[in-house]
Structure formats: structure tokens, C-alpha cells
Amino acid sequence: MQKKVEKEKRTEARKIEIEYIKDEKKEFKEEQHEAQMLKKKLKKKESEIKSLKKETGKLKEEYLRQLAEKENLRKRIEREKNEYYDYALSELLRELLVILDNFERALESEDQGDGKSFREGIEMIYRQCRDLLMKQGVVPIEIKERKFDPHFHQAFMTEESEEVNEPEVSEEIQKGYKLHNRLLRPSLVKVVVPKKGK
């Protein structure tokens, strides 16, 4: 009977051992499966990192190329702007040279001719200058109804009078000009103002 009990104990121990081995194998397979899954995830992440590095490299290269293009554009615009400032007045200066030539001719003819032809030459040069300025958009400021306008007139002198109720221009000392619609130079004027205490 004792043999039978021992045999049953061995059988029981064997069953437990087999169960334990089965559990160990199952755990090992699960761990292997988990390891394989982690390896796959790792490979996928490595692939993503490689792809992102490649994309980052392309974006960096594109950024640097655009930065260089912007810098080149900025330099070109700066160069063109400088050239424009240097040569913007070329046409105007060419026309002024013609007027200067006429001044030289008038000065040479002063000694040779009478005073009348000299005056006519100077008047012709004056008209040329005036026409050139008008062609460039420069127009004289007209004093309307002797009314003083601080936007277009600069008071050089003032004089009090009982005959006026508000400031009036009594004399234009130096002509003022506008360039298109903008003030180029105000008219220098003598102004009559109402007497104080009136």
C-alpha cells in the first residue's frame, strides 16, 4: 500500500511538474511574442525616425535655399535702389544742361550785341526753366484773394492794420511752389494782421 501511495505521490508530482513546464513554456512563448512585437515596433519607430530625418534634411535644405534667395533678392533690390537714386535725375539734368548752354550763349552775346537781345535771351532761358519745372509737375502757388493760408504761405514780415479782420497777404516776397499736389516750397509773404485790442 505504501508503494501505491508513493506511486500516486510521484504521479501527482509528475503532473505538477508537467503543469509547471507547460506554464513555463506558455510564459516563454508569450515573452517571445511580446519581444517580437517590441522588435517590430522598434523597427517601425526606427523607420519613422529615418524618414523624419530625411524629411528634416530636405526641409532644412529648402529653408537654406530660400534664405539665400531672399538675401540675393534683398541685395539686388538694394543695388537697383542705389542705381535708381544715382541716376533718377538723369533726364532732368540733361534738360538743365540745355538751359545752361543757353546761359553760356547769352553771356557770350552780351559783349557783342545790344542790351535788348541779351534781355530777350535771358527771358527765353527763364521760359525754358519755367517750362521744364512745369513739365516735372512743379507749379507756382497762386495767392487767392490775398487770404493768408499757413499751409502754403510763410510769414516773413507782419504789419498790424485796423483795415483787416483776419490775416491777409500784402506782398509776395518769394514765390512758392507745389510738386504735383504736395508743397515744395512755401511762398514767403508779408502779412497784414488785425490790430491788437481792436
Image (cartoon, helix red, strand yellow):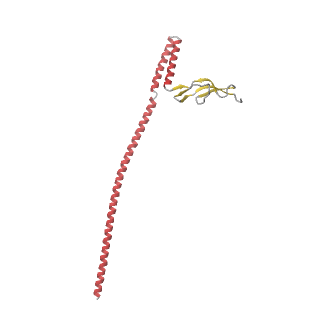
Image-quadrant location for residue 177: top right
The residue lying at 29 percent from left, 76 percent from top is 18
The residue lying at 33 percent from left, 63 percent from top is 37
Q: How many marks?
A: 0
Residue nearest the viewer, comparing 75 with 25: 25
The location of residue 110, given as percent across then percent down, is 51, 13
Residue nearest the viewer, comparing 187 with 180: 180
The residue lying at 45 percent from left, 30 percent from top is 86
The location of residue 116, given as percent across then percent down, is 53, 12
Of all residues, the one furthest to the right in this rendering is: 197
The location of residue 186, given as percent across then percent down, is 57, 28
Residue nearest the viewer, comparing 99 with 127: 127
Instruction: Check the image and report above or below for 87 versus 126.
Output: below
Of all residues, the one furthest to the front in this rendering is: 145
Instruction: Check the image and report above or below for 5 versus 120.
Output: below
Quarter of the image where the N terminus is located = bottom left
The residue lying at 31 percent from left, 69 percent from top is 28
The location of residue 173, given as percent across then percent down, is 60, 23
